[in-house]
Each structure stands twice: as C-alpha cells, then as structure tokens.
Image (spheres, rainbow, N blue to C red):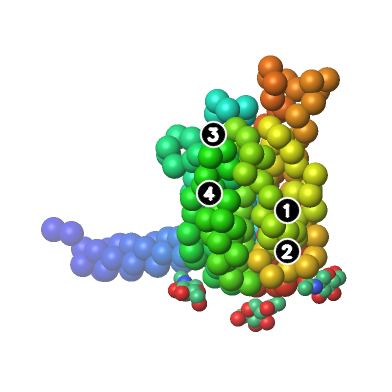
C-alpha cells in the first residue's frame, strides 16, 4: 500500500515543476519574440540589411549584353526576371504605389522596334507618387526620344540624359518628383572597358527607398 501523504507530496511537486517549466518556457518565448524582431528578420531582395519600416527594399539588375535578362525585386518579391520569362529587350519597368507598395503594373517597353508614341503614352500615364523601377536589356536606344528621356528626368533621373546605344541602365525614381534620385546606375558601352564583345558590364543596385515621401533621400 502506498502512503497517500507521499502521493500528495509527489502531486504537489509535479504541479510545481510543471508551473516552473511553463514559466521558463514563456520566458523563452518572450525572449525569442524579441529576437525575431531584431535579428531573425531577413533582409529583403538580398540586401545586406533590413530596411527601416518606412522604406521599401529594392534590387535591380540590368540585362547582360543581349543574353541574360534583367531582374527587378521590390519589397522582397522578384517581379520580373529572366527565369520568370517576363522580361524583354528595351526597358523593363515596374510601377508600384509609393505609399503602400501595391504593384500597379509591370512590363517592358520595346525600345528596339516598339512604337514611340505608345511608349511615351505608357510612361505619361504613370501617376505622381508612384515608384518606378527600370532595368535595361539589350539596347534601350533605338526608340529613345528626348520626350521619353524627359519623362524619366521628371521621375528623378539624371543619367538618362546621357544614356546611349547599348549602355546598361538601372533606375528607381518617383513620378512627379523633381529631385535627383540616388537610385540610378549606368555602365557605358565603350570598347576600352566593355567586358563582353560589343557590350558593357551589366549594372546592379540595391537599397531602401522611402515610402510616401516626395524626396528620394534613401540610402544605397
Ligand atoms: C494601396 O493604395 C492603392 C491606391 O490608394 C489602393 O488601390 C490599394 O488597394 C492599396 N493597397 C493596399 C494593400 O492597401
Ligand atoms: C506618409 O503616410 C503617413 C501615413 O499615411 C503619413 O502620416 C505621413 O505624413 C506621410 N508622409 C509623407 C511624407 O507623405
Ligand atoms: C527636394 O529636396 C529638397 C532638399 O532635400 C526638399 O526640401 C524638397 O522637399 C524636395 N522636393 C521634392 C519635390 O521632393
């Protein structure tokens, strides 16, 4: 026969143990939750750091020569890429709402044998405040006009004024802003520096772009 008093004591000890373990565990969970916010949030779009909450992550790479297509990643999602088979020669473009990051449209403007008026109309339709992400592929120059360059200047581009045949160009700006965007890079088609026969190196950039602010003082 077991002693009921011993049984009761055992029960009390077990209950104490369980309570203690629960307390330890919830402490653990609390700590883990803290860590999740600080260290286990992965940077988006392969950036080396997590963007502040009032910024969107982005990464844009141009095509390489006329062989490998470009890639546009926004807020952690690759929207256009060679692998997704939704890129094309000319200018690949993604338009997102600058406040909440919702994608409005994406596509490519065929700068080799597209219609200049259609290309211009597509660009002029983009409403102020929209964030515009652009990557070149193949050659962006055959159908380029001053009017098209002006639209990109109106989104904060400065390099577009000098972009020419077979240059690689990546850009992120905001429609309706007059300020220079920091999110822009170009490699120039020059026989002395080209790494492919007749083509410059591809160009890539990533960074955190501010949400609904009118200036583009983001950091690269
Ligand atoms: C973002 O804003 C646009 C325009 O106001 C709206 O149409 C869209 O539904 C919004 N998206 C989200 C996720 O709130
Ligand atoms: C951005 O949106 C937030 C929330 O709607 C608003 O409080 C803030 O003033 C806006 N900032 C700018 C620069 O538009
Ligand atoms: C342009 O930048 C200046 C200085 O950073 C800022 O004061 C101004 O609001 C910006 N304007 C626009 C339209 O973003």
Q: Residue at x 27, y 68 (%)?
A: 8
Marks 3 and 1, how far apart at CA: 25 Å
Marks 4/2 in contact by CB < 8 Å: the verdict is: no
Q: Nearer the viewer, residue 136 or 102?
A: 136
Disc 3 or disc 1, which is closer to the eye? 1
Q: Residue at x 55, y 25 (%)?
A: 67
Q: Residues within 10 Å of mark 4 (few under 14, many from 20)?
A: few
Could you say which disc has been placed on residue 69 in the image?
Answer: 3
Disc 1 or disc 2, which is closer to the eye? 1
Residue 132 appears at what percent x and percent y?
Answer: 61, 58
Q: Is mark 2 within 8 Å of ligand 3?
A: no
Marks 4 and 2, how far apart at CA: 21 Å
Identify the mark nearer the N-term, 3 or 1.
3
Residue 98 appears at what percent x and percent y?
Answer: 60, 68
Q: Which residue is mark 4?
A: 115
Marks 1 and 2, how far apart at CA: 12 Å
Q: Which residue is mark 1?
A: 146
| Farthest left residue in view | 1
């Amino acid at each position: 026969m077991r002693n009921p008093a011993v049984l009761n004591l055992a029960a009390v000890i077990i209950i104490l143990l369980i309570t203690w373990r629960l307390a330890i565990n919830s402490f653990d969970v609390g700590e883990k939750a803290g860590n999740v916010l600080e260290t286990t949030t992965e940077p988006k779009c392969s950036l080396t750091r997590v963007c502040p909450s009032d910024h969107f992550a982005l990464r844009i790479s141009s095509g390489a020569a006329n062989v490998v297509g470009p890639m546009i990643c926004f807020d952690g999602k690759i929207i256009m890429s060679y692998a997704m088979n939704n890129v094309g020669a000319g200018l690949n473009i993604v338009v997102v709402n600058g406040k909440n990051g919702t994608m409005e449209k994406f596509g490519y403007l065929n700068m080799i044998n597209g219609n200049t008026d259609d290309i211009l109309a597509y660009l002029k339709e983009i409403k102020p405040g929209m964030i515009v992400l652009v990557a070149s592929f193949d050659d962006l120059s055959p159908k380029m006009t001053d009017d098209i360059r002006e639209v990109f200047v109106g989104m904060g581009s400065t390099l577009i004024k000098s972009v020419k045949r077979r240059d690689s160009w990546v850009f992120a700006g905001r429609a309706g802003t007059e300020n220079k965007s920091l999110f822009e890079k170009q490699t120039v088609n020059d026989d002395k520096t080209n790494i492919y026969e007749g083509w410059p190196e591809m160009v890539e950039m990533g960074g955190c772009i501010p949400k609904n602010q009118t200036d583009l003082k983001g950091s690269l």
